[in-house]
């Protein structure tokens, strides 16, 4: 049997007439066969197959049975006569299945072998054999890979990777053809590729060379103009230095662009500068007394020849087009024998201590930064990396151990995520986590590529590593990272695309990608990943109470008591996030924090904030707009003009910046506000989340405590947090009332965030307690 994946999935029987295809059955069977063929001659676990067949945890309860039936039917298809001696075999191998098939019987494996042969020939300078082998490989494609399954909804990352690698192979083929003098033959294909992929600089450079050799110099320069416009307007980037050099070579009619003289065998061909992105023109000879360059270029060439990527590193774009400075700092050049060029990934953190940390004396800021540095060091070493430099609020870590660059890049990204998680509270899937302590922010950037590192084994003590192009790139990226975000370069995203998802970063052209989620069974924003496992049972109880609230249409009150405030704040914020994202029904969530009683009317700030948020009122907007939105909302909720008139006046005063502070008027505003909440909850279940309730005055506390009795027929859940001052003021807080739950939270011992905050916020002195 012949298996074809490079296009629609087809299986051709070896014993039938030419072109006769085997009936593979339904969608599930074809998808199972296709996925096993993508991993041909390798064991594929059952969990991998289930994830491939049912994305986003949508597998039914009978998923394993469906998979077993599909495998059983496929075995019947593959065992149909006539049976060849070395025919395909579908075997059960723990922890899943193995499809054993000769490589020449699968077009994908045949294609990959031809690509390896062609690239080896191209690296050796045998351009004609390289052109033939790469051309034969590309001729095996009949359309987009597994196009029939893609039309039916299959979306596997392996398919996207195959399509991207095909573009790299096409550029290799064009390079070999240009070296053979066949620019006219490949010109139509080059024009089509550049039109479809306008940001691939290598292909654009090849098209410029082909057009120039065809005597179309103006059109070649126009290609450069289009590429530059697309990069500048779309990404804010300039083309790479190689493309700039090619433009200058065309303008000056450089002889190196002419058709090579020797074709057909070993081509000492004059290739355009842009065709081999990893190479650069020879540097002028150094004076006899000057030290030899420290950056070895030879080790980088085979990698570029065997796996060209067609991408331009952000570091190249960030530097001037003229080589005005060495690739590595002078400190590294001065000790070339102690360093070597290796593929690595680096992470750079910047910690911010804002004005909100007013309780931290100036003399303690160094202690704060030491605690943050220790946190970064612990997470880095946990993931197999090493902190190499600390400068003020910035920490640099390197990941270079191991032969797999993708593994180093993934460990670097996971380290950045772990440090962020240790200092943050998740807020949602569309926004970065929020700082767990106001004013404490973390920014992170990850870059991957070639770097100068201490040799293995390192000296004792190891020589310092203080710079290099890769670190300069990471430093430039970090300058554009917003609080709570993790930005990565193109190469890091390419290496980690199977383990994480990324999205375009709006704030940075140097670091165009932002980490969105890690693919390890849980998002990097997961609650369990931020060290709150000790409060999982409390979180479950809060969800259970919400279910009762909705089912019985009755108000419930949850009070979280925590002396330090850290545990309850994180728990309330996580509960809010989960309700907003994971609740199986329409629930409206409104949240606020009660400020300290420093000015008159502060007890009304949270009710006013919640009312404005529900009505969609901008606190800084004109009063006429607020009045209109309030009246529209009341008309919708109440309907009765008399009720609307009764509620409108006190609620309008509540929203007014000059709200009255008279006790009678405050009581009237809070009464109207409570009635408003009852109406709103009957229209849509409502969750109110308040923190720092210990700052509320007695009037507001009375209202909150009585809600379970005054809102009996409304699905309203009030979750509040307070420190020990609330039970001190109200010893019987909510204990004798129905549908109330009070939880005293234990400290999050061992959590890295707690250790940090213990150093930030020393215990209160006796005078402060009194």
Image (cartoon, rainbow, N blue to C red):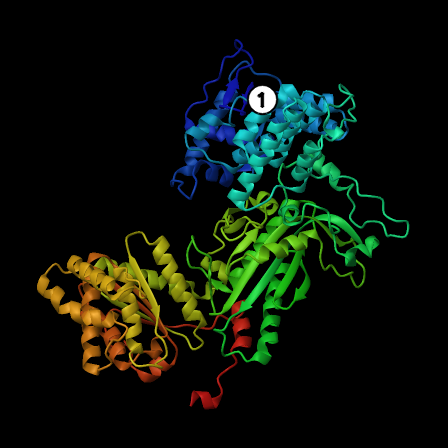
Instruction: Name the one closer to the observer, 46 or 120.
Output: 120
Q: Tell me: 511 left or right of 630.
A: right
Q: Position of residue 237 (x, y in %)?
A: 57, 45
Q: Which residue is mark 1?
A: 188
Report the side of 722 relative to 342 (left or right). left
Quarter of the image with the N terminus is top right
Image coords of residue 610 (percent x, y): 29, 66
Q: Does residue 25 appear to the left or right of 687 in the view shown?
A: right
- Asked whether the viewer can see residue 511, the reply is yes
Residue 604 found in image quarter: bottom left
Residue 400 visible in image? no
When the figure is inspected, residue 668 is found, relative to residue 113, above or below; the finding is below
Quarter of the figure with residue 183: top right
**Element carrying mark 1:** helix
Q: Between residues 741 and 762, which one lies in front from this camera angle?
A: 762
In percent of width and height, residue 749 lies at 51, 71
Occupied quadrant, residue 719: bottom left
Which residue shows up at 81% across the image and 62% down it?
Answer: 460
Report x, y in % for residue 711. Answer: 19, 67
């Amino acid at each position: 049997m012949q298996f074809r994946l490079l296009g629609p999935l087809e299986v051709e029987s070896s014993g039938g007439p030419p072109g006769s295809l085997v009936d593979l059955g339904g969608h599930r069977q074809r998808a199972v066969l296709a996925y096993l063929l993508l991993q041909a001659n390798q064991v594929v676990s059952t969990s991998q197959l289930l994830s491939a067949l049912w994305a986003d945890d949508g597998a039914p309860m009978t998923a394993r049975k469906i998979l077993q039936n599909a495998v059983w039917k496929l075995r019947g298809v593959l065992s149909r006569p006539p049976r060849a001696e070395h025919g395909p075999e579908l075997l059960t191998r723990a922890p899943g299945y193995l499809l054993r098939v000769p490589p020449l019987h699968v077009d994908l494996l045949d294609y990959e072998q031809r690509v390896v042969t062609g690239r080896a020939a191209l690296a050796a300078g045998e351009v004609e054999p390289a052109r033939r082998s790469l051309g034969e490989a590309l001729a095996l494609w009949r359309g987009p890979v597994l196009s029939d399954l893609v039309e039916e909804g299959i979306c596997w990352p392996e398919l996207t990777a195959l399509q991207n690698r095909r573009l790299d192979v096409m550029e290799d083929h064009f390079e070999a053809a240009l070296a053979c003098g066949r620019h006219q033959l490949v010109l139509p294909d080059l024009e089509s590729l550049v039109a479809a992929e306008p940001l691939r600089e290598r292909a654009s450079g090849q098209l410029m060379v082909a057009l120039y050799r065809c005597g179309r110099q103006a059109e070649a320069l126009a290609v450069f103009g289009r590429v530059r416009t697309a990069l500048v307007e779309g990404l804010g980037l300039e083309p790479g230095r190689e493309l700039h050099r090619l433009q200058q070579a065309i303008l000056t009619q450089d002889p190196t662009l002419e058709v090579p003289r020797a074709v057909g065998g070993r081509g000492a061909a004059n290739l355009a500068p842009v065709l081999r992105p990893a190479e650069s023109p020879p540097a002028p000879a150094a004076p006899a007394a000057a030290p030899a360059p420290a950056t070895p270029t030879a080790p980088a060439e085979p990698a570029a020849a065997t796996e060209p990527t067609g991408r331009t590193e952000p570091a190249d774009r960030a530097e001037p087009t003229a080589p005005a400075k060495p690739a590595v700092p002078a400190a590294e050049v001065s000790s070339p024998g102690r360093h070597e060029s290796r593929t690595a990934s680096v992470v750079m953190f910047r910690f911010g201590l804002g004005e909100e940390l007013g309780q931290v004396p100036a003399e303690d800021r160094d202690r704060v930064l030491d605690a943050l540095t220790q946190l970064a060091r612990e997470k880095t070493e946990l993931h197999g990396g090493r902190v190499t430099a600390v400068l003020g609020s910035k920490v640099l870590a390197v990941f270079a151990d191991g032969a797999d660059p993708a593994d180093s890049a993934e460990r670097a990204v996971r380290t950045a995520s772990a440090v962020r998680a240790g200092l943050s509270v998740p807020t949602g899937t569309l926004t970065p986590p929020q700082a767990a302590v106001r004013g404490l922010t973390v920014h992170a950037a990850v870059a991957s590529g070639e770097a100068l590192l201490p040799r293995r084994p390192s000296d004792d003590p190891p020589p310092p590593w203080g710079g290099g192009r890769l670190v300069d790139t990471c430093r430039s990226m970090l300058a554009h990272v917003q609080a709570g975000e993790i930005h990565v370069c193109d190469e890091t995203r390419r290496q980690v695309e199977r383990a994480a998802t990324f999205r375009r970063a709006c704030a940075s052209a140097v670091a165009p990608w932002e980490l969105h989620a890690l693919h390890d069974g849980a998002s990097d924003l997961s609650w369990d990943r931020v060290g709150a496992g000790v409060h999982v049972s409390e979180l479950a109880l809060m969800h259970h109470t919400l279910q009762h609230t909705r089912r019985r249409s009755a108000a419930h009150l949850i009070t979280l008591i925590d002396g330090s405030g850290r545990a309850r704040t994180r728990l309330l914020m996580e509960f809010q996030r989960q309700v907003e994202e994971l609740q199986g029904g329409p629930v409206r969530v409104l949240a606020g924090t009660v400020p300290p009683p420093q000015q008159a009317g502060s007890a009304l700030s949270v009710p006013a904030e919640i009312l404005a948020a529900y009505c969609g009122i901008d606190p800084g907007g004109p009063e006429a707009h607020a009045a209109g939105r309030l009246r529209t909302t009341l008309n919708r909720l109440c309907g009765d003009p008399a009720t609307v008139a009764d509620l409108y006046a006190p609620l309008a005063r509540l929203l007014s910046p000059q709200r009255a502070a008279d006790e009678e008027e405050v009581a009237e505003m809070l009464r109207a506000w409570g009635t408003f909440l009852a109406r709103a909850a009957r229209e849509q279940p409502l969750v109110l989340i308040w923190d720092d309730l210990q700052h509320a005055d007695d009037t507001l506390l009375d209202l909150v405590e009585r809600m379970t009795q005054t809102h009996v027929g409304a699905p309203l859940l009030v979750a509040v947090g307070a420190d020990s001052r609330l039970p001190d003021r109200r010893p019987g807080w909510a204990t004798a009332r129905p549908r109330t739950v009070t939880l005293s939270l234990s400290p999050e011992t061992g959590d890295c965030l707690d250790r940090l905050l213990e150093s930030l916020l020393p215990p209160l002195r006796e005078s402060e307690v009194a």
